[in-house]
Image (spheres, helix red, strand yellow):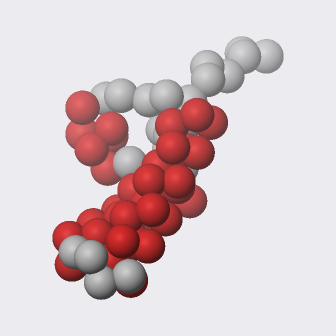
Amino acid sequence: MKLNVGGIDRTLRIIVGIALIGIAVSGVSVWGWIGVVPLLTGIFKFCPAYAIFGLSTCPMQKSE
């Protein structure tokens, strides 16, 4: 599993995921549980959709 979620992208995914889960827990909407997806992709630094489309927000690594 190659990492494909970079710093800012990762931070935003975690914040949005926590906010959506908070909405679900507070009882506003059951759809808030979809926040588990961005939270997990942010934690593990891997997004399956990015992998399918060949995208990455990780900074390029230097060749030695």
Along the line of sight, the residue nearer the viewer: 27 or 40: 27
Report the side of 18 relative to 8 (left or right).
left
The residue positioned 27% from the left and 76% from the top of the image is 28
- Residue drawn at point x = 45 percent, y = 62 percent: 19
How far from the left and from the top, in percent, is residue 7?
Answer: 62, 36
The image quarter containing residue 49 is top left
Residue 52 picture location, percent across and down? 24, 39
From this view, report whether residue 8 is shown above or below residue 12: above
Q: Residue at x 58, y 34 (%)?
A: 8
Quadrant housing residue 58? top right
User: Relative to residue 59, is residue 16 depicted above or below?
Assistant: below
Residue 29 appears left or right of 36: left
Above or below residue 59? Residue 24 is below
Look at the picture and state if 30 lies above or below 2: below
Is residue 58 in view from this perspective? yes
Image coords of residue 10 (percent x, y): 55, 44
Quadrant location of the C terminus? top right
